[in-house]
Amino acid sequence: MTNSHSTLTPVLTDIWDAPRSWTLATYRDHRGYEALAKARDTAQADLVELVKGSGLRGRGGAGFPTGLKWSFLPAPDGGPRYLVVNADESEPGTCKDVPLMMANPHVLVEGVAITSYAIGCDHAFIYLRGEVVHVYRRLLAAVREAKEAGLLGDLEITVHAGAGAYICGEETALLDSLEGRRGQPRLKPPFPAVAGLYARPTVVNNVETIASIPAMVLGGSEWFAGLGTPKSAGHGIFSLSGHVTRPGQYEAPLGITLRQLLELAGGVRAGHRLKFWTPGGSSTPLLTQEHLDVPLDYEGVAGAGSMLGTRALQIFDETVSVVRAVSRWIDFYKHESCGKCTPCREGTFWLQQIMHRLEEGRGTADDLQSLSDIAGNILGRSFCALGDAAATPIQSGLTYFRDEFEAGCHTPARELFPPHRSVLHATDSEEVPA
Amino acid sequence: MTATQPDSRAGERTPVPLVEVTIDGVVTEVPKGTLVIRAAEDIGIAIPRFCDHPLLKPAGACRQCLVDVAMPDREGNVRPMPKPQASCTLEVTPGMVVSTQLTSETADAAQRGVMEFLLINHPLDCPICDKGGECPLQNQAMSHGRGTTRFVDVKRTFPKPLSISTQVLLDRERCILCQRCTRFSDEIAGDPFIDLQMRGARQQIGTFDETVLGFEGQAPVGDAQIDVSGRPFASYFSGNTIQICPVGALTSAAYRFRARPFDLVSAPAVAEHDACGADIRVDHRRGVVLRRLAGNDPAVNEEWISDKDRFAFHWQSAADRLVAPLVREHGGRGDTDDALVETSWADALDVAATLIAERRGRLAALPGGRGTLEDALAWSAFTRVVLGTNDVDFRSRAYGDAAEEQVLGSHVAGSGIAVTYADLEGADVLLAGLEPEEEAATIFLRLRKGVLAGRASVRTVAPLLSGGASKLRADLLTAAPGTEAEVLDAVAELGSADRPGVVLVGERLAAAPGGLAAAVRLAERTGARLAWVPRRAGDRAALEAGLLPRLLPGGRPVDDAAARAEVAAAWGADELPAQPGRDLTGILAALAAGELDGVVIGGVDLDDLPDPVAARAALAAVRAAGGVVVQLEVRTSCVTPYADVVLPVAPPSEKSGTYLTWEGRPRPFAEVFATSAMSDAAVLGLVAAELGLGWADDGAAKAPAAWTGARLTVDATRGAAADAVEPPALGAGQAVLATWKLLLDGGRGQDEEPHLAGTARRAVAQLSPATAAALGVTGAERVTVRGPRGELTYPLVVAPMADGVVWVPTRPRSTGAGSDTLDVATLGARAGEIVEVRA
């Protein structure tokens, strides 16, 4: 999205509005693959240092320093080492990687090529969420174009379509799935850097992380570090959805606030006010009006008791029932729990039944305590972060909107917050458009 | 709790540095790499767990074992980790401070939380569940659970039970998804047997089941083996999954709903079905054995046993069990002419003693290979002292010529323990005439463990790469039956500095011309150790006891006067017969020809003999000639119709004794419960005493001290490539027969076990593609194999194997849809002989 507003920093999104932006020709018209050429003239170690020095942190949600991750790879032993791009974007509310790959797949391909060169990898994989077939075709086409144009050299890039499991966004479950196994997280250690794909040293990075590399190579680490905040450097895509006037992807330096982003997006939909929001998808504890000025960087959001996550800002206005929203998220986590560990598998199964009861206004006196206990028994005790993610909406929901949960003991959510008022183009009709 | 005994540290190699950790305030040192849960066990702190099993790789799935952990940072300040850690996946590090549920509220709360989760979907059917009373979930629910549930919602349910095999049933709603069973199948047995399917709260264990998976009309793909019940997943080790299941999800069809654990009396025992000496536990109630479980012996079978060892025990109390002695009444009693009638022990012993005394010196002994060392020594003493002969042979199988006795006498008998299970784990192993999965299941598991750990490697000399061998990642040295010696002679190297060579010789190699001598040459050439792996529990003891025509106990040659004198002294006899005796073939021939007047026989199934028809004819000839057949047996058998006196003896559960494993390791065991049944040794002692020829004061035949004199020698050039006999040329429509026994087959030890029988491998005939084409049977569903005496029809499998060879199982129980019986003996041909094959 191009916008002349000074707070926006279109880098990844720069050419999204160009005609046929997904083609190699368009990409090359906008300095495409110049970074790859430049990188190939640079020593591998210098590239790793460049990324380290830039302060780039993983854009998939956890925020691990990218250069540091690369440097964890053991010294080459003559065997293969792999780059795996995590494109299994499935988090509710998160919609940055899919539009990025849709509008400009070549920036990812170039990033893959540069990273592969930097870490000494001959075969890279892009593990794509299987449902987005159109993106799959664009990626395949982009890899083919780049290959045919001789841009990739000996590098092999395999685009793999997943089978629709949220858990496969967890990097080790992704690797198992990619190997053809059941998608369940692996025991760590060994970490992927030591024994990842096919038990070989592997770097797993998010799409946006890898796509940020070409511009950094051209612009330099100082340029990159100059954006954002000292500990959260660079630019990132902020996806605003829900009750905003102009939902969409806004690329801005880390550290921008929701207040600024709402200004860019035309504010909460007319006639309504902000009730709660997620800073980074449903897995991050929700925030409220009081957090409008929290800087959206890793430290700022953590300081507010949440997580920056994937910068998927879901905006909910006062028409929305928190109980109903949390109930839908719990449905999701229960459906997507892989089943490997007890807390997540059984906890989400139980949470769902209680949430549905509360939503129907048939909660019991013990349900709020049970919810709190169950979430507490999942958080920090599950095998991977999926369990933690399921617990967070419950806990933050109870923290900020306990009265709504209590109301679930006597009044259905649909009576307190008629759903037809929440739809974007609300009418007086009680019919909820399909 | 199931299987929470300390880790097996058998075969410990280089010493591991110790790490100091503090657990609940107790400072302890454990080897580097030890898991926290194991370190806690070492100092007596039990952390509850379900998915953890000391012999399986850590999973961290159940989360029951969460503990609080603090570790020193770089400056040495001990800092708590932010979340409780799974103690079953976390290795100790220096200075680690662990607080279990005993000292940490966080750990205790975490464990109670997980326990609550595990119970929300678990049915409250403990009163009718097989596991109730010995259930880790039940126990830990009592120690770490809430008194009452607060789960008021809808439990997850499934139709029950799901039949995993004819032997293993699965109640999915009881399952806590710890994955012990799937990990066992993957990591230990190597069978694509059961796996996880679906996900989240719908995740479940199962086999390929269209109705569960929602696949329509699709068959599984892969290397799964079909069992006789038609299920695509067969495993010889599936019973272990029942035992390690920490809840009652997996149950045994044979035991289900039969007993409550607290009504059972448990006794340790040793499995009797092969020469592996697996440690087992026998559970009985009021004199009836209800189930058997794997014992825990890190040096032998660790905690695993085969399904045969586990489930095949009804034979010991089968309907045809002999309870009283029988003697043959010759006429006189109305219409019961020549019938066997029950009599008293006094009468039977008197009759037996009289019949034997009349023919002393003209009787032979066929003692079988199923007895204890004590029984075998008694048979040996009985043969030499009472019968006054060396006509004795424990073998009831094909063995070629005299070479086997030479090799066993020179290299095996009296050699002690040359190779152990632990050795196999780190060896370069060559298998000859041995299919470990079928013939020595414990060896199979130990080899697989070594191979998977990258410490052992396996080659096999066989006509085909069996399923078992491929699970050992074995390299096949293709040998058509009869060419084994040639193939063994071509092996240039075996073993290396860090992976010593071991030649594991199966008993079948003896039947291959020159095979054993070639194995000895290979061992001498490469410096590898040689071990003989027989099939029967008593074979090694029989060898050590000298139940062969040229051998006395401890590998002493019969024709060595000093050896005879030592043994005679030990047995309190004046002298022993000096003339080397007849072997099995010689004995049967002499019986048929009237050169011998009879035989004392026990533990021999005539259908196991190289020529069952000839064996029956020989016994019939004895009867016709007025000779004598004295039988010692647990159950009525095919020998009984020929017997004049039948003396019942105790099955393994009802006697004490010592088995020797293939290694030579003594495996002593006590009787499981007391009955009036007597061991072979006791019965033979009574017969001897009746004749006034008892061999020792206390009735037990003693083994003399180790023999240091000369041993039998091997004719080392036998069957060497230079003078190898060319195998006979195959005519049109002909192939060489290859065959061996499968673990689960028609053996009498598996009688009355229908559930077990359903898990046997399907009986098929296997041909190579080229041979199938040459025989014109490509594409045929069935082939008929014809030998000199008869023919059998099998389903055909065409797969890579030696050309010109047809493989069939020796004696399967199931006949499939082919012939009425599929016993190879029907053909009248043995392994290495030529048969005709047609569509």
Image: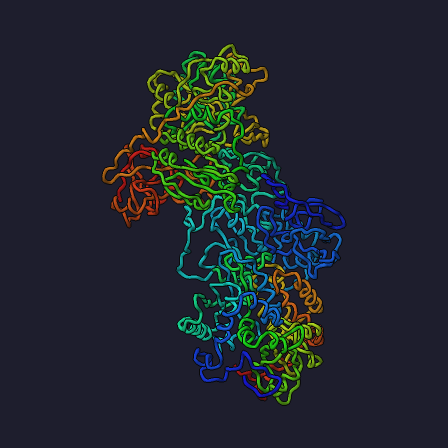
Left or right side of A248 for B720? left
For the image, the number of numbered tags is 0
Extreme residue in the top direction:
B574
Extreme residue in the left direction:
B732
Q: Position of residue B434 (x, y in %)?
A: 43, 37
Quarter assignment of residue A150: bottom left
Q: Residue at x 62, y 71 (%)?
A: A55
Left or right side of A290 for A35? left
Q: Which quadrant, please, contains the C terminus of chain B?
A: top left
Left or right side of B547 for B267? right
Q: Position of residue B545 (x, y in %)?
A: 50, 22
Residue B717, placed above or below residue B796: above
Of B624 and A218, the residue lying toward us: A218
Work out whether residue A283 can be spotted: yes
The colour style of the image is rainbow
Q: Residue at x 54, y 51 (%)?
A: B183
Work out whether residue A86 can be spotted: no
Left or right side of A318 for B466? left
Of A165 and A109, the residue lying toward us: A109
Residue B76, placed above or below residue A97: above
Q: Position of residue B308 (x, y in %)?
A: 49, 39
Q: Position of residue B209 (x, y in %)?
A: 46, 56
